[in-house]
Image (tube, coloured by chain):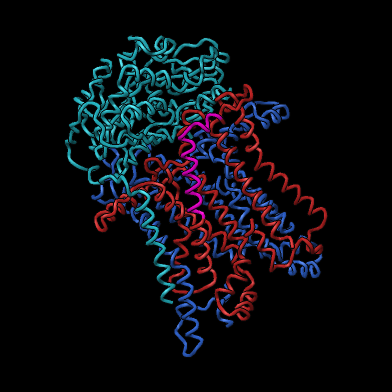
Chain colours: A cyan, B red, C blue
Amino acid sequence: MKLRRMRMMAVPTALVLVVAACGGDDAADDDGADGEAAAPEAGCEVGEVDGDLSFYNWSEYMDPDLIAAFEAEYDVTVTEDFYPSNEELFARVEAGGAQYDVIVPSDYMVDIMIQESLLMALDFDAIPNAANIADDFTSPPYDPGLEFSVPYQWGTTGIGVDLSVTGEVEASWALMFDEATATAAGGRVSLLDDPRETMAAALYWLGHDPNTTDEEQLQEAADVISSARPWTTAFTSDQYSDLLLGGETAVAHGYSGNFLDNFGGDENYAYLIPEEGATIWTDNLAVLTDTDAPCTAHTFIDFILDAENGAQLTNWTFYASPNAAAEEFILPEIIDNPAIYPDHEMMANLFFLEDTGDAEILFTDLFTQAKS
Amino acid sequence: MSVVDAASGPPPDVAEDSVVRPKRTVERILAGNAWIVFAFLYLPILLLVVLSFNDNRTVGVWTEPSLRWYQAMFTDRNVLGALRNSLVVAFISTVVSTVLGTAAALSLERFRYRGQRAYDGLLYLPVIIPDVTMAVMMLLFFVQAFDLLGAVLGVNASFGIGTISLSHIAFNISFVAVVVRARLAGLDPSLEEAAADLYASRWQAFRRVTLPLIAPGVAGGALLALTLSLDEVVITSFVAGPGSTTLPVYVFGLVRRGVTPLINAVSVLMLTGSMLLVLTSLLITRRRDEP
Amino acid sequence: MATTLEPRTTPPPADAAPELGLEADAERAESRRGLLIGLPSLAYLVVFFALPLVIVVVYSFATRSRTGRTILGDWNLDSYARLFDPLVLEIALRSLWLALLTTLISLAFGYPFAYYLATRSPKVRGILLVLVMIPFWSNFLVRTYAWRVILGRDGPFVRLLEPILGTDVQLLFTPFAVVLGLVYGYMPFMILPLYATIERLDFSLVEAARDLYASGWQAFLKVTWPLSRPGVIAGSLLVFIPSFGAYVTPEILGGGRTTMLGSYIVRQFLSARDWPFGSALSVAVLLVMLAAAVVYLRSGGRNL
């Protein structure tokens, strides 16, 4: 009897050991996550490495050859893992013990993470290639003066159209929200299943600020989305370009690079940036405060900001590069495409979505109500 | 497979008994229904196999046949790593949860003791809880547990295959238990009693009689656990660590970028693998059955 | 020795006043043994499920910070008050309806299927059972996306239906597509417990019933169905519960137009970063479903 009881007790104990054993090597110190207001600077030399790198990125957002080149040049191993949304990234990182060194949060998420002291202040002495960053991106609203992040790639949120169905159309949110225009363009629309992006589209169409927290304006935007339901085939944040190419929809709301990559130069499809205004976004490299390898992280960031590497990245992802020095190495079909690199007039009409604090709940609820 | 077949020992062979078989028309309807269900289950699978040979990267648009995605799959270290992680987690969690779940089912169904109600309720909770809630709570729990382990034992634990397996076991125990209990409930106890009289030890009675009787339930539970583990996305992505991404999590990220033919190819690989496994075990049991 | 294995139908009350004599001793030893067998799983669930669950319960009383972090402290019931918002109730009702529909359809096809399976010869049985499971060893997302193609504008169903009905048919991104996807996804959850129960039915009882009752149908109603009840109960619970909280299927096949409770909870944890409200919703779902399951299990023992 005694023996049997012991064996049973051994089960949970053994399981605890399994966890311990499986992750023993590079545990992060969790206390760092909710720590001091001023994150410490790394104090690294240029090109210094202090361990292997864990890189937490979006899927299909990094040329594997670049990773291989970095590994070869600095003799370190890079482990790349993937997250599907900023929110999941935040949930993982905020809880602590995420064990990643470099992450790629979008603009508003950088802002939130800075406020939560999750990001390490970058040591720009170790990132000389930061000088390559284009002027447009040196002082973004989410991280003024670039203290905690450097831009990785950028793009816009606009409209993909199937020209064989819609014919020549004007670049306007009317394709989504005006009944006559939408019906004329095939009457099959997909909108992003994202409270902020889709509410912003309606707000542009109404001529309001996309970051408004005015309840009346938000209600107005929700009403616009709700009235578009008859011709809105789906609310979806993934595969919207597949639905467009498969003929399921004729007009789709989505991100620039994704459309352009999937269109593959087919002239029946076009990506439009609506003239009422549209969203510009950046994804940014940042280092977590509880990193184990701050110097490798800085070296990696510097490596990506190199002119030729930056160009290689853009040539692979089809998203625009914030790296001014890289432009001469970028393929002409990308750099000369106004849908990827909009002209100055258009740039003035692009807005960042900023974190609205408590109003995020309102955005979510109004949007949920509007779509069903 | 051998577990499923083991059940054929004690209970009378139903198929041989012509009286029990339903009447001809009923039998036809049953067979027809079976065909419909199988067609329903396999329709998307057929499509998935066909599309894995599609050159176009858009799922719904057929251009021309190619092996491009199979090639891509075998050269993509992310895919292969994720596949390996998935199989390891599925194996560990299926084995552990089948044992624990069956024990829980036996304990609740065959015995009466104080506090059983509470245990019963607790056992159902993992089935009921929404994925994302379990994901969040496991994440927060492990962070706390690691702090504690570090402070008390000085052990550095971290997220990885271990945490994923532990979380999968936590929900799989319940699924296995539910299936096994359905089998146990009302199972004629006189057989077991007779066995207990015949054999010297409780353990022998269990092994020779009870276990074969409940084997189909155990096998069903194990199959369910395996399936659930291979498909779990939300919880896994919350408790994964560097380098321990599983296939479904990797796929979940990929579909956002619209690269599904690659995933179709991986699925076909997994289907082929599992079919080969089943075929082998069938052959082995057949050989064993021969005199 | 007869006391060693109690049939479920006559459980001796564990907390009854202990009788004198050997029988009481044996009984106590027996209940201890039962507890011991269940102990490892119990311990596991307490450590790796109940403890984490406590965290969620605690969070449900917390407050969301402006940046969406959860402030532990300043405990309140605000999140629970929001549960009675008409939006939440509407979503809960829709989920309830779709989950019920899913369960009934799965049962309607799953029961005769499991019956068919269980009445084959043992060898065929095993093969058929594995054949049921094989599709589910591919990838869930890939399967669901395949349904998107099948139900789409160029898919076989729309092509077939449009000439018959003479109008534009939209199958994809409708509640119909969601239910179909859910039935597909949870079919094995229905079939496996049903199969496990029917396979072990004592068919000599059916035979006797055949002799007594006139029709096979009556024999089924009076004998087979009541005897397979545990499987029906387990199967329906395993289908109903996850359907109620489903998240990925309604998103992919419903096109975000059919919001179910699962998606709404995910929204709270992710988009809105409102963990207290997400936690409160989860706790409410857990309590309601647990209560429903208990009631169902109790009543299932007698009249179904």
Instruction: Establish if A340 lies above or below B1.
Output: above
C8 and C97: which one is in front? C8
Residue B219 in picture, x, y percent from top left: 59, 58
Visible residue check, residue C140: yes
Query: For the stretch drawn in magenta, what is the main secondary structure?
Result: helix
Query: Which residue sits at x=26%, y=29%?
Result: A298
Q: Residue at x 51, y 65 (%)?
A: B103
> In terms of depth relative to the viewer, which is nearer, C8 or B230?
B230
Q: Estimate the x, y position of residue B245 in percent, counting from the top left.
A: 43, 41
Left of C281 or right of it: where is C61? left
For the question of whether residue A256 can be seen, the reply is: no
| Spot occupied by residue C80 in the image (x, y as percentages of width and height) | 35, 50
Tell me the quarter of the image containing the N terminus of chain B.
bottom right
Asked if the stretch drawn in magenta spans residue B84, the answer is: yes
Looking at the image, how many numbered discs can be counted on the residues? 0
Bounds of the magenta segment: B71-94
On screen, A336 above or below A6?
Answer: above
Judging depth in this view, the residue of B184 and B1 nearest the camera is: B1
- Residue in the foreground of this view, choosing between A372 and B33: B33
Is residue C160 toward the left or the right of residue A131 in the image? right
Residue A13 in percent (x, y) is at 37, 62
Residue C50 picture quarter:
bottom left
Measured along the vertical axis of the image, is residue C251 above or below residue A233? Answer: below
Where does the C terminus of chain B fall, quadrant-wise?
bottom right
Q: Where, by quadrant of the figure, is residue C228 drawn?
A: bottom right
Query: Which residue is outermost to the bottom?
Result: C21
> Residue at the spot x=46%, y=74% of the render?
B113
Residue A219 within the segment the image draws in magenta = no
